[in-house]
Each structure stands twice: as structure tokens, then as C-alpha cells.
């Protein structure tokens, strides 16, 4: 693990491109869709440090008064629609310019090719639906199929992600931020290669196979990350992705949705070391903890000193701040930042349960216009 981590720290500069300039020498983009960007960035810097600049960051978006429309097209298949990259870049550009980014909302878009695209880069076939895409498991038999799993940076979907990133950078013209695609290494990657139910059995029948694939996947992931990190840094972008926080350095969103299927002991034995390794690689990280079934792993995750923050996703039908206040409090007591979602009417409960340091109001429902937004931000500013 330590050797792989040492290699990983150079991966951002050992891809296809030369080492970028020192980030301190690069002029920051103005990002006209967020005209207060310099102050907003300081608030996010304070969030990463579990501090407060003047108030916690608050992300609020509203529709723009004038909407931008991209030309419409029809397709013979969902795959054709997903892979029409020039059209998708036009549509995303129109959506960005049709949104108002208020207070600390960041104008971020990313080249979305589905959450399992990393597994596709390593050999899986991809299926495309209307709203998402998913990989087809490729390891039916470990002896026969494991050697087929290899990161291929010349594969069609890898080069498509490079092209998609370039198109968005060209469209953005410094008006908004372009981030990395959604990448899921580690346990979710091996679950995609093998199928989650089969992987759960493998942890009892042949755990050494799982451990070997996790080790291979880590090195491949860091290499792939480095290619896109360089592209964004060369363009003067901060680093971000589908979860729109920003960092001057390496930023990532570790996760393991498969973990809801296994015990705490299995998680800590087989998957926690890779998550620790990933957090050590990043300069800033936020763990995506998805669903009540994954809560059994929270204590182990909070023990990772290099992890900065946690995004707790309670799942549809489980909403309500009061129901999960204890989870948020535990995250704060461990010295981690909190990705917070709540309703306007729950703000008083938030103020009573938490402290402002290290809280990001990522989503506040119940805001119907500028007047409500202003009142909400005034209340948060007065929070002590």
C-alpha cells in the first residue's frame, strides 16, 4: 500500500502530458457566473480547515431571468445520445448560462459519462439509459477473466472523456468551472467488475482475489486521475467534480456504496485500507456515505485522519434533519466537515445542534426566490 501511495503522488504529473506550472504561478480564472469567486473560494478554504471566514458557505441556485436554449436533436439510441459529445457540451453550456449562482454556489459542470466509467476504462462494456449509465460485469470466472481487467487509456470511452473535457473547457471561456468526471475506484469498481452479489460471496470464498484486484485498481485509478488533473490544472481550473467543492490541489470523493452489503469487520479488513490510501493521495476529500445501510461504517471512516469531510445521504423517504442530527454531530465531534442538506424551516434545529465551523449548506430546500434566499443567508451569517 505504501509503495502504491508513493507512486500515486507522482501520478498527477506522469501521464501523457508534461508537468504543469506551479499552481501558485497560475492566474485564477474570473468565472463570471460567480462574480464573487475570490471571496467564495476563501469560504471553501475555511470549510476545508473546519473554520469560518465570515459565515459558512451557502450554495443557492435560481433560474436565470433569460434562458439559453441549445438546439434539440433526436437519436436512434441512448448510447448515441450520450456519446454525441459536441451536442452534450452545447446543452451543458446552455444549462450553466441559464442558472444564477447565488452566494457561494459554484458554477461547476463535469464531463458525465456515468458513475462506472472507470470500470469501463478497465474493460467493462457500458449500457446507457435515459438518466444514467452502468457497466456490465466482466469477471465471471476469476481464473479466466481477471487478467482481462486493465486500464486502457486508448479505449473509446477514455478518449471520449478527454474530448468531452476539452469541449467543456472551450465552451466555458472562463465563465464557469469544469471538473472531473465521476470516478469510483476501490470497492465500487470491483463490484462493477464482478457484480455486487458475487463480490459479497468472494469475500468469504476467495478474498485474496479481491485484495489483488483492489491493489491493481488503486494504481490504475491514480494514473487515470493524473491525466484529467493535469488537463484541468493546465486550463487554470480549481479541481472539482460531481460534488461541487473546490481545491487548489488534488480533490476527490471517496465512496463505497457496496459497503451496505457487508459487515463492519469485512469493510475494515478489505476496503478501509484503500480508502485511507485514497484520502492520503488527495489534498482535500469528502466521503460519500450513501444510505442507512452504510452507517455501520461511519466510525471507521471518521478514524481516517486525512479525511476532511463527510456527505451523508439518507436516501429517499428518510429525509429530515432532526432524524439524523446525531449523525451530523458525530461527524463534527470527529473534527470533520459536514455536507448539510436541510429545509428552510429546519434552520433553527441546525443552529441548535451544530456549530458553524466546517458546515457547508450544500442544499437548502424551500427557497423560492431572492428575498427568501437573502433572509436565509442573513440568519446563517448571524449563527454563532
Image (cartoon, helix red, strand yellow):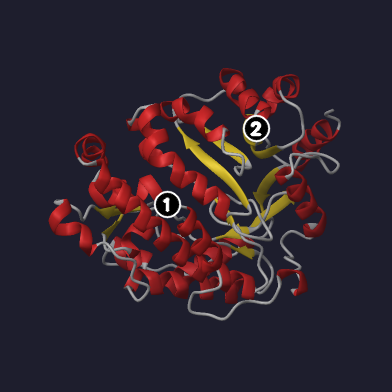
Quadrant position of residue 376: top right
Taking 106 as reference, is 161 left or right?
left
Percent of width and height locating residue 176: 66, 64
The dot on residue 366 is 2
Neighbours of disc 1 within 10 Å: few (<14), some (14-19), many (20+): many
Q: Earlier in the sequence, mark 1 or mark 2?
A: 1
Q: Residue furthest front?
A: 3
The residue tagged with tag 1: helix, strand or loop? loop
Look at the picture and state if 195 lies above or below 365.
below
Q: Secondary structure at mark 2?
A: loop
Q: Residue at x 39, y 69 (%)?
A: 73
Residue placed at 45% from the left, 43% from the top? 273
Q: Nearer the viewer, residue 251 or 77?
A: 251
Which residue position is annotated with label 1? Answer: 184
Q: Give residue 352's quadrant in the image.
A: top right
255 shown above or below 173: above
Q: Can residue 246 be seen from the camera position used here?
A: yes
Amino acid at each position: 500500500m505504501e509503495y502504491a501511495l508513493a507512486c500515486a503522488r507522482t501520478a498527477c504529473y506522469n501521464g501523457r502530458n508534461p508537468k504543469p506550472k506551479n499552481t501558485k504561478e497560475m492566474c485564477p480564472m474570473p468565472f463570471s457566473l460567480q462574480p464573487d469567486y475570490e471571496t467564495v473560494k476563501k469560504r471553501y478554504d475555511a470549510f476545508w480547515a473546519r473554520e469560518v471566514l465570515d459565515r459558512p458557505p451557502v450554495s443557492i441556485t435560481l433560474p436565470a431571468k433569460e434562458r439559453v436554449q441549445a438546439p434539440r436533436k433526436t437519436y436512434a439510441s441512448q448510447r448515441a445520445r450520450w456519446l454525441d459529445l459536441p451536442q452534450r457540451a452545447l446543452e451543458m453550456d446552455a444549462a450553466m448560462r441559464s442558472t444564477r449562482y447565488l452566494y457561494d454556489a459554484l458554477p461547476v459542470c463535469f464531463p458525465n459519462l456515468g458513475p462506472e466509467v472507470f470500470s469501463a476504462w478497465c474493460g467493462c462494456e457500458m449500457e446507457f439509459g435515459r438518466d444514467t449509465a452502468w457497466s456490465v460485469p466482466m469477471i465471471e470466472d476469476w481464473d479466466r477473466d481477471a487478467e482481462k481487467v486493465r486500464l486502457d487509456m486508448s479505449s473509446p470511452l477514455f478518449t471520449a472523456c478527454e474530448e468531452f473535457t476539452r469541449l467543456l473547457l472551450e465552451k466555458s471561456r472562463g465563465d464557469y468551472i469544469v471538473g472531473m468526471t465521476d470516478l469510483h475506484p476501490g470497492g465500487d469498481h470491483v463490484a462493477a467488475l464482478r457484480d455486487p452479489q458475487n463480490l459479497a460471496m468472494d469475500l468469504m470464498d476467495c478474498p485474496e482475489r479481491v485484495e489483488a484486484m483492489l491493489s491493481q485498481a488503486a494504481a490504475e485509478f491514480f494514473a487515470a486521475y493524473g491525466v484529467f488533473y493535469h488537463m484541468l490544472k493546465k486550463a487554470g481550473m480549481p479541481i472539482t467534480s460531481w460534488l461541487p467543492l473546490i481545491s487548489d490541489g488534488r480533490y476527490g470523493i471517496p465512496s463505497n456504496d457496496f459497503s451496505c452489503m457487508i459487515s463492519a469487520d469485512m469493510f475494515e479488513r478489505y476496503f478501509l485500507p484503500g480508502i485511507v490510501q485514497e484520502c492520503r493521495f488527495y489534498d482535500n476529500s469528502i466521503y460519500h456515505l450513501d444510505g442507512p445501510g452504510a452507517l455501520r461504517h461511519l466510525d471507521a471512516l471518521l478514524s481516517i485522519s486525512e479525511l476532511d469531510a463527510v456527505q451523508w445521504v439518507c436516501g429517499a423517504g428518510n429525509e429530515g434533519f432532526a432524524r439524523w442530527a446525531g449523525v451530523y454531530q458525530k461527524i463534527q465531534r470527529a473534527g470533520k466537515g459536514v455536507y448539510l442538506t436541510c429545509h428552510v424551516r429546519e434552520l433553527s434545529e441546525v443552529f441548535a445542534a451544530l456549530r458553524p465551523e466546517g458546515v457547508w449548506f450544500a442544499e437548502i430546500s424551500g427557497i423560492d426566490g431572492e428575498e427568501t434566499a437573502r433572509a436565509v443567508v442573513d440568519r446563517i451569517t448571524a449563527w454563532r
